Amino acid sequence: MKQTVSFDLDLIRRYDAAGPRYTSYPTAVEFDKNFTADNYRQQATLSNQRGGPLSLYFHLPFCDTVCFYCACNKIITKNRKHAEPYLANLHKEIALQAELFDSDRIVEQLHWGGGTPTFISHSQMRELMTITRQYFNLADDATGEYSIEVDPREADPETITLLREIGFNRLSLGVQDFNPKVQKAVNRIQSEAETFAVIDAARANGFRSISLDLIYGLPHQTPDSFAETLDKIIAVNPDRLSVFNYAHLPERFKVQRQMKSEDLPLPAVKLEILQQSIEQLTAAGYVYIGMDHFAKPDDELAIAQRENKLYRNFQGYSTHSECDLIGLGITSIGSVGDSYSQNQRTLEEYAVSLNNNQLPVFRGITLNEDDKIRRKVITKLICHFSLDILALEKELNINFADYFADVYPKLDQFSQDNLVKYDATKIEVLPAGHLLIRTICMAFDRYIQQKNHSRFSKII
């Protein structure tokens, strides 16, 4: 498959500002506490009127040890009993949420994230999935997409067998880097043997997709050392890969202060690692999907992108654009009806809501017509690197040139820099613009001009 990534250092340096990853539009920084559980119920009613399949996301926040680079919402504890009251409350939330949605709606997608979902015991995993099936109508294994994030240090082959038995058919593994010096600096000691044992077990148990996560920009990484990790990853032939840019924001995430800034690779070195990684993976046959993601040409993501059916949500790229997403557990974000909403952020607040038989909605936003129009544009660009203006005008009943008149000066600049080409019928992101797609999408973001970009990570 033809690769369409062009690495232009000058352009990257000029355009490498801070910006959103656009797992939603509007982004989470626009969520408001005035959005309440009552607003959520109204949106669930709207969702039922529209019908269609559902997606479930479960946040399991516990980790045994802390990884110093981590910016996720997690709770670090070695006491496994801490999960018991949380799971009891999660079971309550499942029941409350299920009441809001028509029982004949099929759950086509389910995901456990964290934290470390395999922190909980085997019996707790079984119970959580049993209760989920009790309250929601899950698609069968052939059509359902059921995925879980796995830390190989917390999952032996027996655990992988159990996960397949209770319904999971897709696996995402955190690796980050195999170099011992890097692992020590980020407090994640993870051997190649235990990582590959999980991959072997997943294949032996018939998991349909295996995805590995790597991070570039960590302490002591060099182009040569990261290339060695990539060679080992390519050798085990995962279906998908994510190569994330490490965002060093110690002022926001205290745990990142455990790493020495002087040990981090310089920006020029990070760019060299990124360029080399893209070349290495594309030479190995992977397709650059966008936003740090790579997939085999026959993977569902690559196929969806070719067929113009790719979507983006809070779990990243997805093939299930038609699903409303129900978020369960602390900090979980859902997308229901014409809204986004987020749950309470602490165990205590979450428990108080559920002990009072209340939905644990903390904040959210109801999308207006302008939000929906801009979301459509941004989603098309970030998923497919192109936008059919005529089709969009017909679908949304707008005159694109009039509606986005303020964007055209930026499009002109992008065009001059060979990031895009456009006319009255289409916008096409050129190879040099693929790595800078977030910058291009920001031109259509009504909120971004009014916001402090320090809330976001650098694009590259």
Image: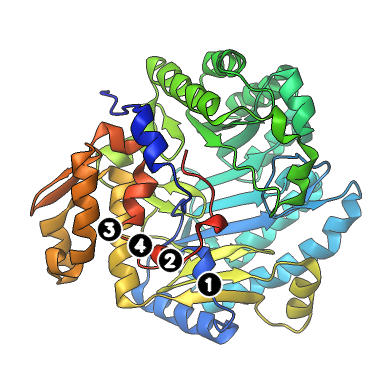
Nearer the viewer's eye, disc 4 or disc 2? 4
Residue at image position (9%, 49%) is 423
Query: How many numbered discs, if any?
Result: 4
Please say whether residue 194 is visible from this viewpoint: no
Q: Are marks 2 and 1 in contact (CB under 8 Å)?
A: yes
| Outermost residue to the left | 424
Going from N to C along the chain, the mark reached first, 4 or 1, is 1
Measured as percent of width and height from the top left, residue 451 is found at 47, 65
| Outermost residue to the bottom | 38
Q: Which residue is mark 1?
A: 31
| Identity, as a three-letter code, of the amino acid under mark 3 | Val
Q: Are marks 4 and 1 in contact (CB under 8 Å)?
A: no
> Residues under labels 1 and 3: Cα distance?
20 Å
Going from N to C along the chain, the mark reached first, 4 or 3, is 3
Q: Is residue 321 left or right of residue 35?
A: left
Kindly state the secondary structure of the residue where label 4 is placed: loop
Measured as percent of width and height from the top left, residue 115 is found at 71, 48
Measured as percent of width and height from the top left, residue 454 is found at 55, 56
Going from N to C along the chain, the mark reached first, 4 or 2, is 2
Q: Which residue is mark 2?
A: 26
Going from N to C along the chain, the mark reached first, 1 or 3, is 1
| Identity, as a three-letter code, of the amino acid under mark 1 | Phe
Choose top left, top right, bottom left or bottom right for residue 414.
Answer: top left
Which quarter of the image is occupied by the N terminus?
Answer: top left
> Residues under labels 2 and 3: Cα distance?
12 Å
Q: Which residue is mark 3?
A: 377
Nearer the viewer's eye, disc 4 or disc 3? 4
Q: Which residue is mark 4?
A: 445
Q: Nearer the viewer, residue 190 or 428?
A: 428
